Image (tube, rainbow, N blue to C red):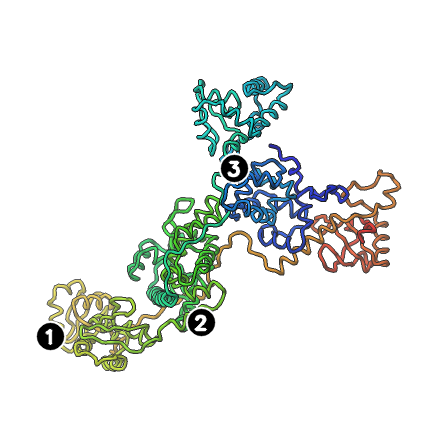
């Protein structure tokens, strides 16, 4: 099937050559007839057309027909709009609206009854708005590039399952063979192959005659057709095919594609299908089904609990990296071992740990320190974040999650080179992620308040909205990750969109609806006789910081359980606290009397803490109790420390102080380090911070969406450039006198001498008229402009440039020619 006039889509005919009936003769003409709002809508829907801004409508049409731009536009069509484009690709060119409707809705007046006929105008309007279809209803034309992409071929089957037309399938076939097929089909012989193919096409497109021919077919032949009718239309045959296949081949119902394959012609398939291009047209988007309904307060309460857990998890993660964060791999990212270690510390699985790590990184709380031995650690922004109220801290996390293109769900997959993707490493950006997250939340927001969706119906809806293979698979994976991550973060509760999540979606501050849902921080804990403390809610910051040193977290949940151990108490003493400080702290923050076992534990550890003193000799141990030092010397476990007695109360060691401290603690003692003056050293580790780092920038999917200001400026520039390219001008007198000898060809700016150029622009400046000039800038780029000169002096002409919509100055020696506009153009 030829493309016919479509080959001239971007050609700009002269104004005098416009079709008599007013119908556009090219895509450029169709775009030129649009108003500014429609052009702006096209540029917004296809922002790649703006890079750079087209000089005129002809350039816009040409760019809109390029392969890369058309592929991008097709990828963003919904299923029925794409089915409409696919139907146009197998329809005659140009295609009347009635033919297109029959391809999508069938030849029967009421079939199929799924709203196809009612939905077709909307789908066609979408294709027109995106400049994929142009022409009136009786001459619908799919842009040539889209037809080439969607039309069926032997190497690229069409989603319609249709094969080539009779004319395409018989191209290259011998005239004798074509005449044999015509005769076997019961048609009269013709004088040439072209008329023979036309007669055969007429037979296959005539429902009555086609039904008569098929009635003569053997039952086995009909079974062969039934297997090919919905595609793929190709079948393999042997050198001596079976009689049913031979019967079909002799009459042209199957035509040879190669020596071993036959193909079902498009006209035959459409007759057998009842005129349908698709087996199942899908004009209406599938509804997102409700799986369960919950009371909205219950949803919000559940989401608030998840939000609190998210804050605690992120804070625990970042604080665990502030003293000795994991190293950065040479290729970037976190090693598998460190990811497993982090997952164990957070008491979760590795994919969830990767999500929390990536979330903290997206929020700017974690970064690499940039040192030679590069490690990850908290950024200075983490300290500012910790000081915010809980609702605002959550708002910062959720605000970083929604637009992020880095996808934690890709951790563990392989890149195109076969390398495993690591958390915090390169290759995790998925440009479609922000759009999919927002679309999932929009679909949740459209459900009744408190309703959770059926996941499969949600995926079906997303697949309908972006059905292109590859695109739809990626979106399905991203949608599944979105549902999981939104629940972990508290954007949803029990699968339903929460009030904070709705505010996040609507660009409102999510902290406002979340704050009333969060419990107030408590400054009391419940101390129990089994050496545990129960925090009945989120703890106030000072209490949480001290308790994190004094006790170990035993379990998390609605109430956090801390356990006091000799090691945790010693950790507090090493941090500079005294026994009296710890007793006073617990008495102040306990809602119950301090249990006696806990007081005994603190006193016992404090009594033993510091009895041994370790310093640098290489190192030494000092103790007033010489019997205790004798006990250490007699212990076989101290052999590796290289101890020897220097004095009744002093032991020297070959090990360094740190190793000596660790060795004695492993033996069950509680030594304390001392300075050269004999004072106890406070072993509080300094919190490490990386240099200030910017948050990771999302990787956009294609060109960014233009704002209203850019769209308005682009439309003005295109209109102005179009004026310069299509304005009718007067023929210069000198060229007219030569009777075509020196005049310019149609559509070209005539060249004028320097004297003629100067005289014309001076006259235009005096009379205030508008002229058309050809101009070559300093880079050698030639352009045509419509200007209104206001001053000519010093070898320059200054005037209002209608093309650029501003006042500019042009060098006279760079003007190649000048012409006055026709009277009706002024």
Residue located 58% across and 23% down the image: 172
Q: Which of marks 3 and 1 precedes in the sequence?
A: 3
Q: Report the side of 641 relative to 802 (left or right).
A: left
- Foreground disc of the pair 1, 3: 3
Disc 2 is placed on an element classified as helix
Residue 457 position within the rendered picture, expressed as x and y whole percent measured from the top left: 41, 51
Q: Report the side of 127 relative to 397 (left or right).
A: right
Q: How far is mark 2 from mark 1, CA to CA?
A: 65 Å
Residue located 78% across and 50% down the image: 773
Mark 1 touching mark 3, by CB under 8 A?
Answer: no
Residue 525 position within the rendered picture, expressed as x and y whole percent measured from the top left: 27, 76
- Asked if 221 appears above or below 598 in the picture, the reply is above
- Crowd band around label 2 with a 10 angstrom C-alpha radius: few (<14), some (14–19), many (20+): some
- Foreground disc of the pair 2, 1: 2
- Foreground disc of the pair 2, 3: 3
Residue 272 position within the rendered picture, expressed as x and y whole percent measured from the top left: 50, 31
Q: Please state, as top left, top right, bottom left or bottom right, where the N terminus lies in the image.
A: top right
Count up the numbered dots.
3
- Crowd band around label 3 with a 10 angstrom C-alpha radius: few (<14), some (14–19), many (20+): many
Q: How far is mark 1 from mark 3, CA to CA?
A: 100 Å
- Asked if 179 appears above or below 201 in the picture, the reply is above
Mark 2 touching mark 3, by CB under 8 A?
Answer: no
Residue 458 position within the rendered picture, expressed as x and y whole percent measured from the top left: 42, 52
- Crowd band around label 1 with a 10 angstrom C-alpha radius: few (<14), some (14–19), many (20+): few
- The quadrant holding residue 209 is top right
Disc 3 is placed on an element classified as loop
The residue at which mark 3 appears reads as: 276
Q: How far is mark 2 from mark 3, CA to CA?
A: 54 Å
Q: Nearer the viewer, residue 453 or 776?
A: 453
The residue at which mark 2 appears reads as: 512
The residue at which mark 1 appears reads as: 627
């Amino acid at each position: 099937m030829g493309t016919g006039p479509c080959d001239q889509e971007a050609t700009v005919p002269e104004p005098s050559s416009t079709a008599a009936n007013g119908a556009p003769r090219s895509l450029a003409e169709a775009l030129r007839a649009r108003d500014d709002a429609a052009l702006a809508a096209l540029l917004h829907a296809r922002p790649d057309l703006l890079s750079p801004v087209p000089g005129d409508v002809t350039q816009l049409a040409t760019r809109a027909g390029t392969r890369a731009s058309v592929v991008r536009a097709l990828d963003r069509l919904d299923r029925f709009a794409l089915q409409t484009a696919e139907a146009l690709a197998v329809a005659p060119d140009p295609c009347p609206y009635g033919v297109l409707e029959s391809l999508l809705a069938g030849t029967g007046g009421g079939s199929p009854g799924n709203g196809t006929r009612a939905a077709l105008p909307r789908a066609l309007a979408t294709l027109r708005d995106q400049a994929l279809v142009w022409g009136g209803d009786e001459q619908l034309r799919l842009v040539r590039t889209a037809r080439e992409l969607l039309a069926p071929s032997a190497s690229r089957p069409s989603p319609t399952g249709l094969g080539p037309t009779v004319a395409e399938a018989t191209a290259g076939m011998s005239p004798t063979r074509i005449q044999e097929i015509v005769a076997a089909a019961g048609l009269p012989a013709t004088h040439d192959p072209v008329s023979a193919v036309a007669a055969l096409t007429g037979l296959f497109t005539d429902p009555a005659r086609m039904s008569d021919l098929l009635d003569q077919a053997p039952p086995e032949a009909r079974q062969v057709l039934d297997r090919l009718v919905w595609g793929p239309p190709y079948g393999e045959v042997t050198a001596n095919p079976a009689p049913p296949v031979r019967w079909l081949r002799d009459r042209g119902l199957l035509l040879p594609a190669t020596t071993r394959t036959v193909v079902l012609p498009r006209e035959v398939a459409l007759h057998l299908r009842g005129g349908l291009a698709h087996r199942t047209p899908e004009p209406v988007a599938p509804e997102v089904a409700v799986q369960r309904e919950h009371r909205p307060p219950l949803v919000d309460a559940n989401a608030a609990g998840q939000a609190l857990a998210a804050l605690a998890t992120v804070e625990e993660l970042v604080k665990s990296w502030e003293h000795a964060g994991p190293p950065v791999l040479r290729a970037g990212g976190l090693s598998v071992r460190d990811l497993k270690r982090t997952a164990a510390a957070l008491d979760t699985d590795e994919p969830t740990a990767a999500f929390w790590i990536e979330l903290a990184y997206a929020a700017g709380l974690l970064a690499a320190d940039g040192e030679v031995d590069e490690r990850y650690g908290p950024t200075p922004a983490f300290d500012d974040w910790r000081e915010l109220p809980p609702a605002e801290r959550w708002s910062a996390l959720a605000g970083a999650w929604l637009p992020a293109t880095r996808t934690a769900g890709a951790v563990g997959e392989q890149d195109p080179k076969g390398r495993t993707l690591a958390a915090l490493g390169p290759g995790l950006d998925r440009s479609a992620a922000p759009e999919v997250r927002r679309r999932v939340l929009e679909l949740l927001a459209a459900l009744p308040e408190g309703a959770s969706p059926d996941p499969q119906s949600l995926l079906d809806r997303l697949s309908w909205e972006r059905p292109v293979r590859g695109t739809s698979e990626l979106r399905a994976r991203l949608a599944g990750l979105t549902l999981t991550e939104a629940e972990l973060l508290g954007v949803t509760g029990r699968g339903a969109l929460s009030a904070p999540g709705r505010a996040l979606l609507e660009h409102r501050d999510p902290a406002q609806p979340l704050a009333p849902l969060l419990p107030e921080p408590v400054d009391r804990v419940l101390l129990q006789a089994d050496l545990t403390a129960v925090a009945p809610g989120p703890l106030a910051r000072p209490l949480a910081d001290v308790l994190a040193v004094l006790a170990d977290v035993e379990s998390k949940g609605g109430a956090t359980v801390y356990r006091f151990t000799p090691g945790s108490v010693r950790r507090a003493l090493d941090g500079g606290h005294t026994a009296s400080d710890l007793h006073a702290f617990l008495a102040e923050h306990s809602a119950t009397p301090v249990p006696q076992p806990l007081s005994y534990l603190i006193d016992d550890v404090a009594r033993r803490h510091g009895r041994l003193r370790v310093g640098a000799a290489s190192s030494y141990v000092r103790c007033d109790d010489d019997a205790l030092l004798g006990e250490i010397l007699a212990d076989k476990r101290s052999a590796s420390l290289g101890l020897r007695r220097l004095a009744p109360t002093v032991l020297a060691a070959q090990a360094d102080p740190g190793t000596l401290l660790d060795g004695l603690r492993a033996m069950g003692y509680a030594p304390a380090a001392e300075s050269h003056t004999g004072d106890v050293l406070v072993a509080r580790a300094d919190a490490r911070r990386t240099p200030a780092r910017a948050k990771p920038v999302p990787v956009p999917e294609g060109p960014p969406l233009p704002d209203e200001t850019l769209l308005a400026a682009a439309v003005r520039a295109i209109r102005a450039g179009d004026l310069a390219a299509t304005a009718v001008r007067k023929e210069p007198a000198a060229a007219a006198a030569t009777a075509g000898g020196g005049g310019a060809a149609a559509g070209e700016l005539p060249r004028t001498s320097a004297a003629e150029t100067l005289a014309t622009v001076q006259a235009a400046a005096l009379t205030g008229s508008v002229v058309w000039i050809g101009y070559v800038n300093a880079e050698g780029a030639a352009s045509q402009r419509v200007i209104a000169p206001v001053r000519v002096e010093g070898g320059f002409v200054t005037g209002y440039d209608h093309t650029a919509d501003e006042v500019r100055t042009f060098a006279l020696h760079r003007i190649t020619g000048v012409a006055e506009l026709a009277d009706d153009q002024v």
